[in-house]
Amino acid sequence: MGAGEDRAVVLAARAKLNLGLEVLRRRRDGYHDIRSLILSIDLSDRLEIRSASSGEVRLRCPGGKAPENEENLVFRAARLFRDATGERRGARIVLRKRIPVGAGLGGGSSDAAATLIGLNRLWGSRLPRSRLETLASEIGSDVPFFIRGGLQMAEGRGEKLTTFPAPPPVNFLVIYPTLSISTASVYSSDDLLLTRKGPLTRLSSCSLTTRSGFLSCVARLRNDLEPVVVRRHAEVERIFRVLREIDPRIVRMTGSGSAVFVCDPEESKLAKVLKVSRSWGWQVFRARGVGRGWISIVPRGARKDSLG
């Protein structure tokens, strides 16, 4: 065993919810300018990263829930970090997936961000957060958000972030219809309507630090990608139809789908949402909004494949 190979960094790579998402314009580079209020939630993947003197990056994903090759953004993040720092050591990474793939929850991007943060800590590289965010933007538009986490307003391609104070404790139900949707296909849709001026432009008038203010604000938001996905995917349309019959206070799609979330469900309706979702075979996750901070260090000598 090489020096430092008995030390590991373990990270919880948290999912996100787009509380509101406005698509403003198509850019010359093919991307879209957006405006989105994004919140970290405690649904998470877990990564264990160890140094490897061989210089190779190796990834294992038990259960086969994600690729273990270059298709995984974890690989790209690890190699990008090595190139940026000149690091010669490799890494052995164990990724345990819980965040559904193709759900609009940002699992792959969060895993990539966690890899950058973990290697920075593990190898003592001491890159500042601003540099990590720059590297993250080379991987994907929403990866910089996961470097910060918490509650953020994302603009531009998603890389321009404004940090908001930690939100009050709010509960969510996330419903996933076991349907993976390509983000690129949704944004390239001919029937995508662009927002000229929407509720997110007036977000400064909201009080996001109180429970009532937060819920009132989120209730006024929307997701511009939602109509496109509902028209294309009958199962997502069914989720909205079924949930709105139960009438929870806020039902919205996150990102480009396919997951839909219920915000702060009343106790009287919670059991109904759970029952009907499971009857349709949809996966249901309970989650809470969380602030920033997600990293922990495994003590020296801990069992290699332990993820806590």
Image (tube, rainbow, N blue to C red):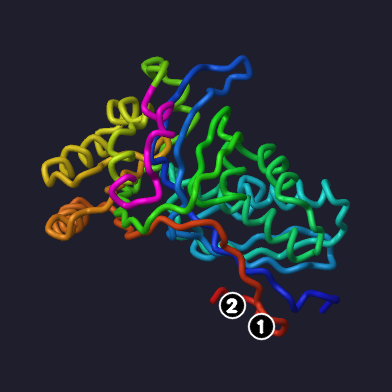
Front residue of 246 and 307: 246
Q: Which residue is mark 1?
A: 302
Between 270 and 35, the one nearer to me in the picture: 35
For the point 47% across and 20% down, which residue is it?
24
> x%, y% of residue 188?
47, 21
Query: In this rendering, would 180 be left or right of 75?
Result: left
Q: Is residue 193 above or below residue 96?
A: above
Q: Is residue 275 left or right of residue 185?
A: left
Q: Position of residue 45 (x, y in %)?
A: 51, 60
Q: Position of residue 9 (x, y in %)?
A: 67, 69
Does residue 200 belong to the magenta stretch?
A: yes
Q: Residues at badges 1 and 2 in contact (C-beta under 8 Å)?
A: yes
Q: Which residue is mark 2?
A: 306
- The residue located at (83%, 60%) in the rendering is 55
Gap in Å between the C-alphas at discs 1 and 2? 7 Å
Residue kind at label 2, given as amino acid type: Ser
Residue at the image position 61 percent from the left and 65 percent from the top: 295
Q: Check disc 1 and report its element: helix, strand or loop.
A: loop
Q: Amino acid at mark 1?
A: Ala
**Which residues, given as a range, are shown in magenta?**
198-213
Per the image, label 2 sits on a secondary structure element best described as loop
**Count of numbered badges drawn on the protein:** 2
Q: Is residue 170 above or below residue 191?
A: below
Name the quarter where the N terminus is drawn: bottom right
Left or right: where 104 falls relative to 217? right
- Pinpoint residue 62: horizontal percent, then vertical percent: 53, 65
**Does the magenta portion include 269?**
no
